[in-house]
Amino acid sequence: MDLTKEYIAQLEEHLATGQLDSVKEDIATLHPADAAEIIEELDEEVVAEFFALFDDERSADILMELEEDTRESIVSQLTTHEIANEILYNLDSDDAADFIAELDEETKDKVIDEIEDIERAKTIVDLLNYPEDTAGGLMAKELIRVNENWSVLTCVREMRRQAENIEEVHTVYVVDDDERLVGTLSLKKLLTNSTKTKVSQIFNPTVISVKAAMDDEEVAVIMQKYDLVVLPVIDDLGRLLGRITIDDVLDVMKEEAERDYQMASGISESVESSDDLLRLTRARLPWLLVGMFGGVFAAQLLDLFSLEENGRMGLFIPLIAAMGGNVGVQSAAIIVQSLANETLKNSSITTKLGKEFGVGLLNGAIISVLVFGLSQLLGWEILLATTVSIALFAVIIFAALFGTFVPLVLDKYGVDPALATGPFITTTNDVIGLCIYFGIGKVILGF
Amino acid sequence: MDLTKEYIAQLEEHLATGQLDSVKEDIATLHPADAAEIIEELDEEVVAEFFALFDDERSADILMELEEDTRESIVSQLTTHEIANEILYNLDSDDAADFIAELDEETKDKVIDEIEDIERAKTIVDLLNYPEDTAGGLMAKELIRVNENWSVLTCVREMRRQAENIEEVHTVYVVDDDERLVGTLSLKKLLTNSTKTKVSQIFNPTVISVKAAMDDEEVAVIMQKYDLVVLPVIDDLGRLLGRITIDDVLDVMKEEAERDYQMASGISESVESSDDLLRLTRARLPWLLVGMFGGVFAAQLLDLFSLEENGRMGLFIPLIAAMGGNVGVQSAAIIVQSLANETLKNSSITTKLGKEFGVGLLNGAIISVLVFGLSQLLGWEILLATTVSIALFAVIIFAALFGTFVPLVLDKYGVDPALATGPFITTTNDVIGLCIYFGIGKVILGF
């Protein structure tokens, strides 16, 4: 479905002029994800009217696709009975649990009470017990399970029964008599074996699974590493609890990548789609304040070094600050990326610092020589040029080590290492770089 | 499988002491992705010996999981006959095509000639025609297709036949007599309908597909938006060509996110896993050189403004430069993210610039007032403090607009907008920020 401007304009006109039958026609084959995108664009006063035109199943899916603000505003207009038996009823158990978790305590209890299907209520309450950022928090309960002792015939009959309640069949899981996951059964084996064959003879016993308590980012690494589309979740006894599908993990991965990216660029919240100037400003101000205090501190520091008496040293402040900042961010970013990708954590802090030291040494040497050469072409005083070159060399090596060290230490103490890639590292490098520069200047220029 | 240090140490010892039978035992259930990870860690001299212990099917999968360098070194020791009929034979057609595409021209031709299964050779040659970064370049030919006029019984018989050549059945595609994709058939419908039912009565006609020429990043956006695990690819006549699975798209997404992240942190290649100091240095040097030339240029500029006679203005150079850089990177990063996520491209350049202008105005006002307040606490001269505050306000607004404008323009002319988030924008902002600062200083301080 192409969401052309013409299509949306037509829809808006039909809505504005109350031609609801035309709107219904327009949206007949609209995918929930597209409907959600349109709702985000519509004027607030027509949203409820538009939303009411979709059947229960699509309404539920649309709600899950909306931004949190919009979802809240639509949900606030629904009764707890509608939420329980129209919306939740049409969601997979993982989405249903996520949906409920977002409600305030009072509404949450009411909604759970209202769920007519008691089995379903149990499932959802079970899922609510798992922390959001674990495998248990990501999993859904809907899956097809067969017993290893069944024949292919029984298997197909049971699958048929179980499939009634499941929208999409991903994998057929094989369990033993104690409900422990023992393997998977491929559709291919099911199709190509006689109906009398026993499941235990044809199932695939190598199945990758995770425990419910595993961290969601680790789940993402595993699904990606092993190219999995769906991953079974087990309890400590190995019993099959549920399954995680790749689309949920994709969201985790995307959020993680965005958070790293935002940290590196000094933004503290994901707000790009917001139109609220105050929120947009608030998301950026914290890091700007870090930079501001750093800058004011640098000014005080330069005053200590009597910059006004060594005015010509001031010319190279931007150069020193820029190089320190750039090198520090490069090193920090490399470490953050390698921490995110790493599954084999066998290279030590010392190895990493050693590698960055080597790279810093090389880059430092190249840059210093180039700057010294340039300085002679441009006719700078030889002592000043020497000071700048030596300082650059020292600052680059320091920044490389500092940029490596900080994220590793943060990670060790359980803080997000990406914090080190933002304005924090550039600001600190600015200040320390200036100290190094003026320290060397004091020795060489003797002020 | 947990790759513990003990496990790897044991494996290495068994390899070193030639206990190949023990090694075979160790690796009996090893997943190809784990095997690849171990190979990357092993000493070069034992790699070939270790690799030879795996059967053809796992060998092929392991090769696909290796880093390019390692893969090349192993492949160079295989005959073209082995490549064609042991490795390629065990790969899905998309991986087989990717694999061949990496070989040099001469080997490529030889390998294609050696493929014994002529149908397979045709499939691979077909796939090689699609550009790497398109839907066609991502797709595999292996899929299950059924005709809309078949009965469920014929359908299952045909699926059984087709499944023989396919490792995993993702979706059953329904085509008409002209091989045009008309929908999908769910396993559930197949299980829950009588064998006499016609496919046309039970298939799902709403299926999202893409044309073979679509850009791979657009494919990634679509699969993510619609939560798809597999996506069919059609030609211009709507005929079913192949299918793309989410794992291949995940790689595209990951590469894209990494590229953006690296751009923002000033790294020009993905080398974090390399141990080659020269390569590591080369990946970072380009952006450092940009920063260096910017810094040298800034020095020349400050000289023009006779910094040594206005020494106290120099104190605030780090502050002005840091704020300009930070604000510029924030704005650029926001635009890069919104360009990457956007499917509804309906907000114009003017709207975006307007929004950033508003945010810049607010942040600029807050920062300027704070700095002015601080300056009075710290006892700076009032005229200098005024100059710094006004300059900060102007620099922040300029940087916000510049940071918004540059990626939008780059994107418009088909250049990767992420280029704007790196040292380029900080360096330019440094230089222009200094001009603004000294320009304002000239007026207020009257030097």
Image (cartoon, coloured by chain):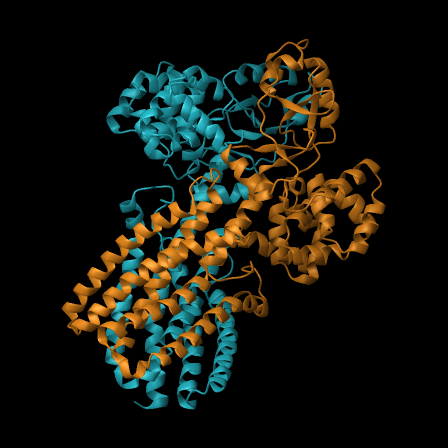
Chain colours: A orange, B cyan
Image-based side of B208 in relation to A426, left or right: right
Residue at position x 39%, y 27% in the image: B63
Residue at position x 45%, y 22% in the image: B58
- Residue B2: in sight, yes or no? yes
Find residue A233 and report its image quarter: top right
Q: Is residue A273 above or below residue A383?
A: above
Image-based side of B429 in relation to B307, left or right: right
**Residue A381 placed where, x, y %?**
17, 74
Image-based side of A308 in relation to A103, left or right: left
Q: Quadrant of the C terminus of chain B?
A: bottom left
Give the camera-side residue of A190 and B314. B314
Give the camera-side residue of A172 and A409. A409
**Residue A17 placed where, x, y %?**
68, 59
**Residue B10 placed where, x, y %?**
45, 26
Q: In this view, does B4 lie above or below B191?
A: below
- Residue B238: in sight, yes or no? no
Find residue A75 and report its image quarter: bottom right
Image-based side of A428 in relation to A57, left or right: left
Residue at position x 44%, y 15% in the image: B21
Give the camera-side residue of A141 and B359. A141
Q: In which quarter of the image is the N terminus of chain B?
A: top right
The image shows a total of numbered marks equal to 0
**Residue A367 placed where, x, y %?**
24, 59
